[in-house]
Structures are given as structure tokens and as C-alpha cells.
Amino acid sequence: MTKHTDHFALSVWRGEFLSKHTESDYREHVKEVTARHLVVALRVWAFLLVAFGWLDFMALGHSDGFYHLMGSRLLSAFFLLSFSVMVKYRSDLAKDGVGVSILEVLGFLLFFIIYFVRPDIVSWNIGVTVIILISLYIFIPNRVVHSNIVAFFGIFGTLYCLFLLGAEPPTLVALFFILCFPTIVGYFAATRLNLASRQQYALFMETVQVNQSLQAEIKRREALEVELKLQATTDPLTGLLNRRQYENLFSREQERVKRHGSKLSLCVADLDHFKRVNDEHGHDAGDQVLKHISDLFVDTLRHTDIVGRFGGEEFILLLPDTDLDNALTVISRLREKLQASPVNVGDKVLQVTATFAVTEVVAEDATIEDVIRRADKALYQGKEAGRNQVVAS
């Protein structure tokens, strides 16, 4: 027994995988190629059968014997060509070898007629039988086990025909060993070819499995890279951009403002009385409120706007290509929508509001801290003035 793994273990006597499942997969894998080779073999076989009819005509002429032989040849050729057409369009017929084995047995039966119609060429027929036995293994694609059965049928059928023709037992024994020789040679050659093709298949499948494992590992690493990047750039609770990421995006937008003279506004939003939510309803309720507001901000603003969590209950909103007046309009609508969107926490409905401070980025702002500092002053004024409002700075 030779094996790459237990799954691909091979029987050196059968020339097949020990695993029925693996052997079935192999035959399915090679059935198209096997079918093409079988079609060629069957058509060549049919041609040779008919072509050798000329020798019968040379010896027998227009006799009943010739017509009997030619009829058997044509009948065999008809079966061979019919089956070749079926295999061409239904490659599954070549997969298990049953059909071609039956055809080979039938071919032997028709071939045996020659012994009785033309007993004068017994030696010639024995020589042809030797060639047929080797061809069963080498020329016609089939399973080794099936070829063995057909070969032994051919050997014992030939000996029986000779026995009926009066051959002596010593002659039959000698002929038995003579016919066994091409059978043994064909068997070992076919087994070697079958083992080699299955070893190649096993290596191919192991390569496929390795490639699949590599592809799975690559996808896993890519997913991990995306996850790490997400963790590095977003707030884990709300999914909004974290401070590092929105500061990087602010720097990019600020450069665009300097190059193209476009507008950029920044808004700081601070939830009103958020500590009271945590104290009265628990931190889980507070987390739900933060997630609700984050989703509301993202869904309401444009996809080009940048929403980040500043920390605690504070948020940063960056509005590219937006001057102060337009920013006030946008944020006012956002405040109204927030006020009209209570949060369901268990069996309670929490009314949530926020105070917004809006400022426009100017050329004198060196960093985002300069802009936030200006917005913070306006935010303080808004809270002093009663919260739940939009203040400009």
C-alpha cells in the first residue's frame, strides 16, 4: 500500500484509492478525459473489426461462413459505435467501467464464432487473442478489476472453444499459460498507469487544499487588518471616528481650504444632562443613548460630513464646503430632529437634547485645537443660556 495521507491511500493490487469516496471523486474528476479516450478506442476497435473482414472474404469468398463472420463483425462494430456515441454525450458512462466491460465480453463472444467458422486459422486467432488481452488493459480505458474479469473470460472462453474443436488437455494447459502471459503484463502495466494517475490526482488535490488554506488565511488576515484599522480609527461604542482619525481628516480638509479657498465649518455637540441619564437609568441606558445619537447624526448629515466622538457625551461634526450660515442651518435641523427623536430604554422613553456650538475655520487656525477652543467658548454660552440650542462663534 502506498499513500500520501490516509485519505489518499492506494491499493497497489487494484490500482485504486482505498477510500471509496476518494475513488469516486477521482473518477468524477477524470471522467471527461476518460470518455474522450474511450470514444477513440471504441471507434478504432470498430474499424479494425470491419477491416479484417477483408481477410475473411479472401479466404471464404461469397460463402455462408463469410456472411456469418461479417455479420458478427458488423454487429460488434454497431455496438461499439453506438456506445461511443453514448459516451461522447454522457461521459458518466465511462466513469465506472461497467458499460465498456459488458461490451468487451460481448466482443469476445462474437469473436469466438471465428473459431468454428474458420478452424483453419486457429493459430492466427490465438495470436489475435494475445493482442486483445493486452489491449484490454493498455488501449481501452477501464478499471483494472473489470479488465481482469474480462481477460479471464476471454482466456477460458478461448480454451473452451479449442476444447470443443478437439484440442488435447496438454495443449490447453500450454495455451492457458501462454494467454496468461499477456494478461499479467497488461495487468501490471495498467496497474502502474492507474497508480501514477491517482498519485498525480492526490498531489493535485493536496495542492488545491493548500491553496484553499492559504486563501482562507489571506482572507482572515485581511479581515483582521480591516478590524485592526477599524479599531484604530473608530470609537468602539458608537462606531464614530475617534479623535486621532477625525483630526487627520480635519488636517486634510484644512489643506483643501488653503489650496482652493473652500469653506469648512466645525461643530461641537454636547448632550444635555447626560450625567443624569447614567445616574437615574444606568450606564447601559447611557450607552444606548450615545449609540442612538451617533446613528442619528450619521443618517442626517451628508456622507461627505465627518462625525467623530470627542469624548464622553461630546461629539465633533466637520462640515466640508459649508460656511457658517449654512452650517447653522444644517445644525439647527439636526438639533430639531434630535429633540423629536426620543430613545426607548426598556419600558422608558428618554427625551434627549444637545447644545451645539458652530464655528467656521479661518486662515488663522493652525490646528483643530484652535477651532475647538473657539467652539467651546460658544458651547459654554449656550449651556449658560439654557441648553438645547445652536450657538455660533
Image (cartoon, rainbow, N blue to C red):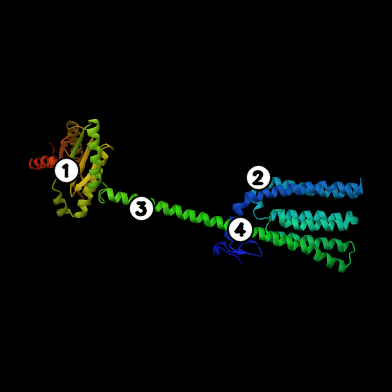
Q: Which residue bears the numbered disc 3?
A: 224
Which amino acid is tagged 1? Glu
Is residue 125 shown left or right of residue 95? right
> As rendered, which of 252 and 319 lies closer to the eye?
252
Which element carries disc 2, helix, strand or loop? helix
Asked whether the residues under the numbered discs 3 and 4 touch, taking CB atoms below 8 Å apart as contact, a structural biologist would say no
Eye-nearest disc, 1 or 3: 1
Determine which quarter of the picture holds residue 138: bottom right
Eye-nearest disc, 2 or 1: 1
Residue 237 placement (x, y as % from top left): 25, 51
Q: Earlier in the sequence, mark 4 or mark 2?
A: 2
Which amino acid is tagged 4? Arg
Q: Which residue bears the numbered disc 2?
A: 89
Q: Earlier in the sequence, mark 3 or mark 4?
A: 4
Asked whether the residues under the numbered discs 1 and 3 touch, taking CB atoms below 8 Å apart as contact, a structural biologist would say no
Determine which quarter of the picture holds residue 202: bottom right
Residue 130 seen in the figure: yes
